[in-house]
Image (cartoon, helix red, strand yellow):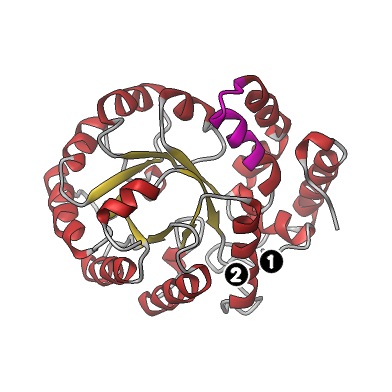
Amino acid sequence: MKDISESQARLKGIFNITVTPFTASGEFDFAGLSRNIERVIGLGYDGILIGGTYGEFPAMTADERATLFRHVMEVVGDRVPVMLCSAGSDARVVRDLTQLAGDLGGLPMVTPPFVSEVTDAQIISFFKQMAPLSRTGILVYNAPGIGITLPPVVLEQLADIGGVVGIKQGDLNPTAIDQIANRLGGRLRLFCASDLAFLGPMMCGFDGISTTNSGALPEIILATYRALESGDANTARELHRLWYPYRALARRYGQPQLVKAAMNLRGFDGHHVRAPLIDLEPGIISLVEQELQRLAADPRSGVTLK
């Protein structure tokens, strides 16, 4: 993408949150990453997100993240829009990665700085500093998982900052979703940050979703989204129910560990997580395999096993 206008136009639909495949020794597997990207683009995903919270960016150095950005943009080119997570607690690192992401043609995704006792005014100031650095604008990621949940009143102030093209909303409280959809819808792009419960935000008028579990179950999650997108809420609901047992495992054992385990079972390039995360134990992997077998036995899922 070349500028903010193009980012605003293309920032919609279903984006795969691409996991970062690490070797057993903790190195990047760039070939495996490329294969994972090509898979979801080939299936028809509207975009990808690289190096986010489930991409394990907190376990990477700034140089590693920059290398990851460059590799991915070389692979993708301009075929689909790419969100590049430039979040961090060190504003200097965020500044450098945000500028790099925009220069490469991606859309930087920025969280509030996760430092102790940061105030709303300081968060707003932070985003005002970051937004002008990227020629493609920035995406605000409201990510409760890092310890800060931005209320709708703060998101409304962030929406007024020039260069903010969208919000990826991780707080799925129905009241917050209702307020955001009705007060910010149409002003900028709204993304649901979780595939575990995206039907509600999409029905409220959100513009798209980002999905980690589509690394392991790309077929059924894409089919669910497309059904909802076309107005077939009944089919979307039934497909979403179909993979609920998998979602229950994901909530219990954590992402991206479970996603990578399921990808490996399907012959995809999930590989390993990086410390401090730990790969799932064999007994839990057996539970994941049983769930994949259940889904593969139902033709509606589109899931096949190697």
Image quadrant for the C terminus? bottom right
Q: Amino acid at mark 1?
A: Asp
The residue labelled by disc 1 is: 269
Which quadrant would residue 267 be assigned to in this image? bottom right
Residue 97: give its label.
none
Instruction: Name the residue at 43% across, 76% down.
Output: 70
Q: CA distance from mark 1 to mark 2?
A: 7 Å
Decide which of 198, 281 is in the foreground and name it. 198
Image quadrant for the N terminus? bottom left
Which quadrant would residue 275 be assigned to in this image? bottom right
Residue 33: give its label.
2
The stretch in magenta equals 222-233
Local secondary structure at mark 1: loop
Local secondary structure at mark 2: helix
Q: Is residue 40 magenta?
A: no
Decide which of 106, 79 is in the foreground and name it. 79
Instruction: Name the residue at 28% across, 39% down.
Output: 188
Instruction: Name the residue at 24% across, 63% down.
Output: 134
Rendered position, 144 above or below 232: below
Q: Residues within 10 Å of mark 1 (few under 14, many from 20)?
A: many
| Relative horizontal placement of residue 8, taking residue 75 as reference (left or right) | left
Residue 249 percent coordinates (x, y): 68, 41
Decide which of 146, 105 is in the foreground and name it. 105
| Whether label 1 touches label 2, CB < 8 Å | yes
Residue 181 percent coordinates (x, y): 34, 27
**Residue 254 at least partly seen:** no
